[in-house]
């Protein structure tokens, strides 16, 4: 559906560019400049149609990149390799609508410091290349870190880079298909799309007291217990949700990662979104 919409946007932008050209406005421009005009129009249309933000640079660069690549006269097999790489990296993005982008070091450090000491079992859902799980496991040797990633390319690279780390386990798979009940902390850096479903699963399976931390994307219609703000360029926000006893099914196993009363380093309720 989204791919069809993206294709339609590209086509409409191309038609508008041709119409403007026929009206004599863009006469004399090179093919690359015309492709850039089409890219700008496509990105603007995508913005107007409220496409997800990550579509905008794709729309902007698609045709200019194609024109540029053609002018470089790259061999045909390079296109096939490029396509295969994109498939391996983005795999099911069209279905999940969660592209690959990476947590930065400052974000990992803030969370590693904010979570209370003690052995925690931490799950990174959609672990990508391990850019959260690896530094977190290094900063928190007291904890066991797990990651699960659907796309084969990032999962393979993550496994390679994680070799030798004893408190880190990474696997390939769908995080909706695994049991989260043994984890104290679930970390998500996904997109707005799956957050409702992620929260439903967290409430169903996590123990009371366990925490769901979502980088950048809040759970719709649920107030976070607190929000950590990272001092990075985009002022990353970590939305923290503690599973309450009255929400979770099994009240016997209560074990709070963050106590109700705020302790030093736990997310400040005053910072709520
Ligand atoms: C934005 S990246 C985050 C990577 C890493 N967690 C980090 O913070 O650096 C999200 C990843 O989630 C993966 N993903 C999306 N839906 C998934 C699912 N249902 N099961 C496993 N992985 C999934 C995507 O393939 C993508 O690599």
Image (cartoon, rainbow, N blue to C red):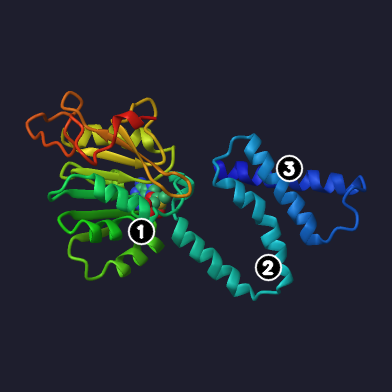
Please provide percent x and percent y for residue 258.
19, 37
Q: Nearer the viewer, residue 217 or 116?
A: 116
Closer to the eye: label 3 or 1: 1
Residue position marked by numbered label 1 in the rendering: 131
Residue at the extreme front:
264
Mark found first going from the N terminus, 2 or 1: 2
Residue position marked by numbered label 2 in the rendering: 69
Q: Residues within 10 Å of mark 1 (few under 14, many from 20)?
A: some
- Residue 83's place in the image compared with 10, above or below, is below
Q: Which residue: 61% across, 41% down?
A: 5
Q: Quadrant of residue 206?
A: top left
Q: Please report contact status of discs 3 and 1: CB closer than 8 Å, yes or no.
A: no
The quarter of the rendered structure image containing the N terminus is top right
Query: Is label 1's Cβ within 8 Å of ligand 1?
Result: yes
Please provide percent x and percent y for residue 120.
16, 48
Q: Residues within 10 Å of mark 3 (few under 14, many from 20)?
A: some
Q: Nearer the viewer, residue 61 or 97?
A: 61
- Could you tell me if residue 150 is visible in this image? no
Label 2: which secondary element: helix
Q: Please report contact status of discs 2 and 3: CB closer than 8 Å, yes or no.
A: no
Q: Please report contact status of discs 2 and 1: CB closer than 8 Å, yes or no.
A: no
Q: Which residue: 68% across, 39% down?
A: 45
Please provide percent x and percent y for residue 42.
69, 45
């Amino acid at each position: 559906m989204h791919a069809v919409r993206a294709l339609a946007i590209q086509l409409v932008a191309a038609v508008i560019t041709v119409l403007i050209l026929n009206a004599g406005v863009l006469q004399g421009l090179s093919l690359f400049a015309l492709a850039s005009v089409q890219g700008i129009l496509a990105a603007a249309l995508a913005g107007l149609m409220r496409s997800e933000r990550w579509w905008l640079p794709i729309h902007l660069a698609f045709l200019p990149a194609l024109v540029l690549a053609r002018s470089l006269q790259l061999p045909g097999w390079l296109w096939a390799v490029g396509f295969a790489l994109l498939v391996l990296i983005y795999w099911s993005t069209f279905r999940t609508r969660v592209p690959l982008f990476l947590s930065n070091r400052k974000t990992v450090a803030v969370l590693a410091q904010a979570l209370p000491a003690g052995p925690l079992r931490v799950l990174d859902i959609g672990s990508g290349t391990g850019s959260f799980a690896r530094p977190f496991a290094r900063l928190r040797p007291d904890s066991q870190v797990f990651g699960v990633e659907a796309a084969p390319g990032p999962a393979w690279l993550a496994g390679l880079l994680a070799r030798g780390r004893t408190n880190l386990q990474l696997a390939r798979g769908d995080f909706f298909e695994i049991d989260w009940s043994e984890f104290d902390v679930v970390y998500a850096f996904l997109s707005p799309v799956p957050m409702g479903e992620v929260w439903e699963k967290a409430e169903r399976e996590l123990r009371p007291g366990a925490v769901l931390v979502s980088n950048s994307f809040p759970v719709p219609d649920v107030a976070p217990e607190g929000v950590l703000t990272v001092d990075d360029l985009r002022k990353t926000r970590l939305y923290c949700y503690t599973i309450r006893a009255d929400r979770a099914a099994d009240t016997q196993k209560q074990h709070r990662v963050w106590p109700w009363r705020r302790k030093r380093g736990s997310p400040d309720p005053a910072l709520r979104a």
